[in-house]
Image (cartoon, grey):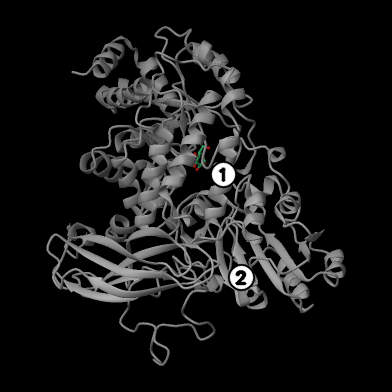
Amino acid sequence: MSSTENFINHLLAQMTLEEKLGQLNQSYPHENFDPELLRQGKVGSLLNASGALTGQGFSESSSAEVCNHFQRLALEARLKIPLLFGRDVVHGYRTVFPIPLAQAASFDPELVEEAAAVAAREARAEGIRWTFAPMVDIARDPRWGRVAEGAGEDPLLGARIAAAAVRGFQGNDLSRPDTVVACAKHFVGYGAAEGGRDYESGEMSEATLRDIYLPPFESAVRAGVGTIMSAFIDLNGIPATANRRLLTDLLRGEWGFDGFVVSDWNSVAELVSHGVAEDRAHAARLALYAGVDMDMVSGAYLDTLAESVRNGQVPIEEVDEAVRRILRIKHRAGLFENPYTDPQRAARDLLTDRARQLARRMACRSMVLLKNKGDILPLQNFRRILVAGNFVHARGELYGTWSPDGRAEDATPLHEALRQTAPRGTELLFALNDDRAFHLAHRADVVVLVMGEHPIRSGENANVSDLGLPPGQAEFVEMMAGLGKPLVLVVFAGRPLAITRQVALADAVLYAWHPGMEGGAALGEILFGQESPSGRLPITFPRATGQIPIYYNHKNSGRPVSPQGPFATRYLDLPSTPLFPFGYGLTYTTFEYANLRVGSEVLRGAIEVSAEVTNTGSRSGRELVQLYVRDLVGSRTRPVRELKDFRHVELQPGETRRVTFILREEDLAFTRADGTRGVEPGTFHVWIAPDSQGGLRGEFVI
Ligand code: GLC
């Protein structure tokens, strides 16, 4: 038996029932928190948060001193089991990177991994040993505030980013001093909350669950994620926190996950309000039996499980197994050897120049150019530029949701950053979205509007019923467009917004998301041409809120969309296509795709698919070449497109390169009508494409 297992079993054998339940209990230093509980061994983990809305910035920072203080108390307990300090380090710690949805737009898992590694090193320097990230929930409904935190709508992109984030946070040795335990959340289906309303219930078929929502979690498990967090959601009538089929049979039985499961905030006790538990004791029994090892802040485990064990309702073996899983992760994280943090580390490890440069690079790679009529961008032919809008002085507003350790003062205000990156001789004028902007515009050669949603409108339970620009902003855009000046619109948001009218009015539209602390400089580098935009949409942009749900990998239906068909699926008042499709994005040059080659007519094992990509413009550029398939006939209806691979190519003007993908038979597996997973014979279409709607199409059979 390994030394870790010997260590765990030896420790477990000494533990009283109360001490065991203490390890299953996660608390947080709220105003009524009693530190005596630490000395009594009744807390296994502390969540550095000041409340349930830590993501909305309401949470004082952690620090090595704070963690060391609580750790000293915990190590006064009889068995000296160290605390595991957890915190939401979602897209950076003190160096704040673009929000995860923006990072997904980079389609650059390596960059995501680098950013997570920086976040881990910084968090660890202040005593954090466990982050509640990556959030890997597939999201098809941008009304949901938490669409900001994930990787969008696609299972392949989500899976690659999930694995990259886990590798970045955890490295290849959890005991190293620059790693933290990661947590793939929220298991599972949380993004399917009805109406995009957080905490609502959700319904989906087993096939959709397995083919769309589970792949990012499986990818995180294969990457060795140390923990999983159960979701608030009632999925198909079974709350995720009480779902043994998913938390134990699938997660551990099918996938072999060997870390531990933590419930989301108070979700154990909330099984009572879900109506599946009569009281907290019943809720605790259900959650433990389902496979939730640690109870986040409800206290139900600590308060009720001793009685449930003593009266025979809960076998002690269930408690012991949960304790083992938690002790195993603590041991792997090196907590027993190194429970404390050197307070000197922070000064050295936080907010380094390298970290800032990486944040800027990620912000550049995340921004998506949606329109560029007449190549108005980059702004190289305008001397006097008006920059106006509610983001003109943005600092902390650039950070987005879930950045509790970011400090606004660390960011250069947007207007200042633009001033620093503008070419010599450019005169910049600045205004908010007000009358002054209107008057200054008359003097300007071009107007750049910097608009969008404040981060408080993004994140947990920040759901909106209307995907238009926030109140008053559409009117401002309309007014400024009426001046007839060349108009560039830059949108800051944590979700796709239905900016159909604004796209029609503007000459160019750049989607900046919430780009993090270096977002101002990144915007300047793109607007003035030092960098070319290369982001692509990780989520479909709807024309209007009423189109939701709309996503690229939809089914064909019996009456598919067709311009002329009177019975084709459609709206009377809106085209059936999205405003912008998944995978879409422009850059400052153009690319052409030619000479598709499909390695053979019949796929046996694997097949090569390639095409030539040519930079037909006058500037170098970075293109995301995408591989899609369609299974034409299946025992169950199949999506009209499925992303199966993607790769960037950097091409000089005039340069042509053949891009080759290898498509393996197992890549084509899906949940068949009989519920089994596998590949079915038949004809497939295959595309090499610049987005999920265009590209060169070929064919092969299995
Ligand atoms: C919140 C979130 C979860 C977060 C946890 C701790 O409610 O749902 O993502 O990790 O509580 O802050």
- Amino acid at pointer 1: Ala
Identify the residue shown where x is 49% and y is 69%: 548
Q: Is mark 2 on a helix, strand or loop?
A: loop
Q: Is residue 691 visible?
A: no
Identify the residue shown where x is 49% and y is 71%: 590
- Residue 149, position as x, y percentages in the image: 51, 49
Q: Is residue 206 visible?
A: yes
Task: Say whether mark 2 is within 8 Å of ligand 1.
Answer: no
- Amino acid at pointer 2: Ile
**Side of 387 relative to 253 (left or right):** right
Q: State the residue position of label 2.
A: 499
**Front residue of 522 and 612:** 612
**Measured along the vertical axis of the image, is residue 245 above or below residue 317?**
below
| Quarter containing the N terminus | top left
The answer for how far apart the CA atoms under marks 1 and 2 are is 27 Å
**Front residue of 439 and 261:** 439
Q: Are marks 1 and 2 in contact (CB under 8 Å)?
A: no
| Quarter containing the C terminus | bottom left
Q: State the residue position of label 1.
A: 359
Counting other residues with Cα less than 10 Å from the Cα at mark 2, is it few (<14), some (14-19), or many (20 or more)? Answer: many
